[in-house]
Amino acid sequence: PVECPEKSLSSAGASTVGQCECVPGYTGTGGMCSICPAGSYCAGGKSVLHCPDKSTSDEGASKCACAPGYRGSDPYACTACPSDEYCPGDGQEAPCPANTHSTTNAKSGRECACAKGFTGSGGTDCSACAAGTYCPEVGGEVRSCPANSMSDLGSSAAAQCACKSGFYDRRGY
């Protein structure tokens, strides 16, 4: 049998180094193998194939996987990560943390914004809006209740601000 250079192998009956083929993750001919570039895959031998749309690979890959923001086990059929989840890549998906929301194609838990009624930087850093305030939008912008009114912890709308004892609003409530 022929002794092939590093990262290559020969089939039974090979008689020259020129018959050595690169192992998966590498490309080249005659045993002269180089690492497969990122965004492509090399099944072995001399072919370099680009990853399909919505999929990717690291350098030295023998197959592609769904890119961050996409999910699925087949790199030819990756689909958008649904809202309220995030997909870090490699076909994986996870729900957004409690009290958060994401749009489609979120790549990490940091893209999960605080839900209405909560404030913070998103991800795992969301807490209920304080009493006397409300947070009406995804993303956690805090607004104060009008003068002489109060809201419960975690309020998400101005309508949840009620008049304090001894006060009434213009409608007579």
Image (cartoon, rainbow, N blue to C red):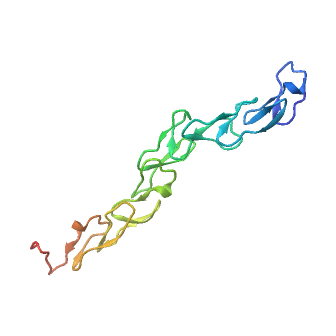
Is residue 30 shown left or right of residue 38? right
Q: Position of residue 63 (x, y in %)?
A: 64, 35
Classify the position of the C terminus by image quarter.
bottom left
Is residue 70 shown left or right of residue 12? left
Is residue 155 shown left or right of residue 120? left
Q: Quadrant of residue 90?
A: top right
Q: Position of residue 120 (x, y in %)?
A: 43, 66
Residue at 19% across, 78% down = 164
Q: Which residue is situated farthest in the left direction here?
A: 172
Residue nearest the viewer, comparing 118 with 48? 48
Residue at 79% across, 39% down = 34
Q: Quadrant of residue 37?
A: top right
Q: Position of residue 42 (x, y in %)?
A: 70, 34
Question: Does 158 sit above or below residue 147?
Answer: above
Marks counted in the figure total 0
Residue at 54% across, 35% down = 73
Q: Which residue is situated farthest in the top direction here?
A: 13
Q: Position of residue 114 (x, y in %)?
A: 40, 61
Residue at 24% across, 68% down = 158
Question: Does 138 sit above or below residue 151?
Answer: above
Q: Quadrant of residue 39?
A: top right
Residue nearest the viewer, comparing 60 with 91? 60
Classify the position of the N terminus by image quarter.
top right
Question: Does 23 sit above or below residue 146?
Answer: above
Residue nearest the viewer, comparing 132 with 46? 46
